[in-house]
Amino acid sequence: MTGTYGAISVAPRAPPDRAEPPARKAVTVDKIRIRWLAAVAIALALSTGGVVYAAHDKDSREATEAEYEADHPEKANPAGEEAEEEGEEDAVADPDAKGSGPVAFTVAGHSAYIDTRKLPAAPPTRRPPRQETELRETGPQGTGPAAPVQTAVTALAAPSPTVNVAGLDFQNWGAGWPPDTNGVVGPNHFVQTVNTSIGIFAKSTGARVAAFTFDDFFANSGTSECDADNGGDPTVAYDGPSGKWVIADFAWINSTKGPFYECVAVSSGSDPVASTWTFYSVPAGDGQFPDYPKFGSGPDAVYFTTNNFRHNSYVGSGVYALRRSTLGSASLQVLHVTTGSSFFSLLPANSTTAGTGPEVIASIWSGRISVWNMTPNWTTPASTTFVNTANLAVSYSSVGRIPTPGEQVDSLSPRVMNKAQLQGTSLWLSHTVVAGSTAGVRWYEVSNAATSPAIRQQGTYAPADGLYRWMPSLAVDKQGNMAVGYNTANSSNNPAIRYAGRLATDPLGTLGQTETTLIAGTGAPSTGNYNRWGDYAEMSVDPVDGCTFWFTTEYYAATGSNWQTRIGSFKYPGCA
């Protein structure tokens, strides 16, 4: 039997641990810069705009870039033009990489009761730096209507934070740059993950209850691939429909040859502090490096996506469904498909409530919002469908580096940022784009996401104050009010953490709740290749009241290499 990928029927292939890498045709494209984590580089030829695959060595301690002299677009490269650097190499692309699937397999689970307060409170092992690749678009992208740019602020500010506390930092809990900050709120706790540690905080006060490394958490879990080799790109999710926590990161046996795994831990209930956890080593990437995994709760499963690389080639994105009814069991059911290399950095839609119908998957790339529906068939996996339902034209220009008083930092523009939020029938997305001579937060509401996707509203938030705004994450409360958090900086202002938002009744395309500062940074990353930033932040909504937003991301308390993270909460007064 066959499964459906887009408009193409494809035959199911072998499970990931037995897949043979397809032949490829190498095509030389632009340059790459050495970057932290995975020893791979990517390249891709798209019909719209230029593409640069860049990477850099985070631990080299060598400053290889000129400092910005002022906040001018020709210096900060808001259109994404990158200066040539030391250590550049040619990249290759795999234009023949095609989507395939579906593939079904099971993963054995190993359970253990863990009181996280008793785990060692020790920093993670800091291993030698690895390389990671970055796909960049340069210049204007897309032919869609221009989004309105909001340069004026309203008189009404977003609510002040009710909880505002320090999260994990590099000195005590970090293993590299960037922190890859994730964090979500549950019934009684906020759980934060960074490279490569986990922190649990009391929701009522923000007090830290426990902190520990991924390696200590997974130690003796029965997943030999993950016990002591957790490699980063951490994620955490509270799956509301099942009432369970899902904490994950990736691991590998060999960073260039694999095999590769997503290390997944599932709690037995809503208490992450003292719980029975079930651990899984989920084969990922089909023999390719499964970078940038992102999670979301769907109708019948918890989903995650990956960007897959083979040596110097980007070969497509993977989409994985972890069947909800088997989470925490001795045998986890998994279904997955892949896209071809013309789509990049997919996100699974995240919903805080149980639903029906297909899971929505989305990406922003090459001037379009691409939307898919995935409908797993757990009885007959080959009948699983994964259909590209829309490619909505948008327009934007990609941002290059963000200036700070110290090192200029990565923007990750224009990839769609964590998470894609599904509220009702609307899908909400955000990313960083050029806004005049700086960078702004672009956000979208896509209505009827699972049936007939259409852009209901979009806007670029970029107050005319000379600050760059980047690395956004948004969420939507039960009343349809939206909040988005992000960083701000320029060459004379240290990176700060701010948030803004809109009520459901605000005019379309606007953020009527102007920004509030969670914390004003008092430092910046020093020169010396600490220019990785993010790679993501996270906004989530309290699953109990459906109103309170929680946001976490990074900043610096002092100029140097010791990144900090912050955790804050707030709610709109009218939500109850």
Image (cartoon, helix red, strand yellow):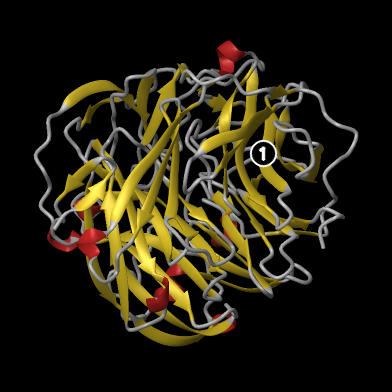
Side of 13 relative to 135 (left or right): left
Q: Residue 491, percent across and down? A: 68, 24
In the picture as drawn, the residue positioned furthest to the top comes out as 74
Secondary structure type for disc 1: strand
Left or right: 223 as drawn, with respect to 439 = left
State the residue lying farthest toward the front: 452
Residue toward you, 54 or 107: 107
> Where residue 391 appears, x then y in whole percent?
41, 32
Is 440 located above or below residue 388 in the figure?
Answer: above
Task: Identify the image quadrant of the N terminus.
Answer: bottom left
- Foreground pick, 253 / 478: 478
Q: Is residue 338 above or below residue 167?
A: above
- Residue shown at the point (64%, 16%) measured from the top left: 437
Residue at (41% x, 26% y) in the render? 366
Residue beneath disc 1: 487
- Quadrant location of the C terminus? bottom right
Q: Is residue 320 left or right of residue 368?
A: left
Residue 400: tell me if it is visible: yes
Residue found farthest to the bottom: 113
User: Furthest-right residue in view?
Assistant: 155
- Amino acid type shown at disc 1: Asn
Neighbours of disc 1 within 10 Å: few (<14), some (14-19), many (20+): many
Query: In the image, residue 568 lies at what x, y percent?
Result: 74, 56
The quadrant holding residue 243 is bottom right
In the rendered view, tell whether residue 147 sits above or below residue 133: above
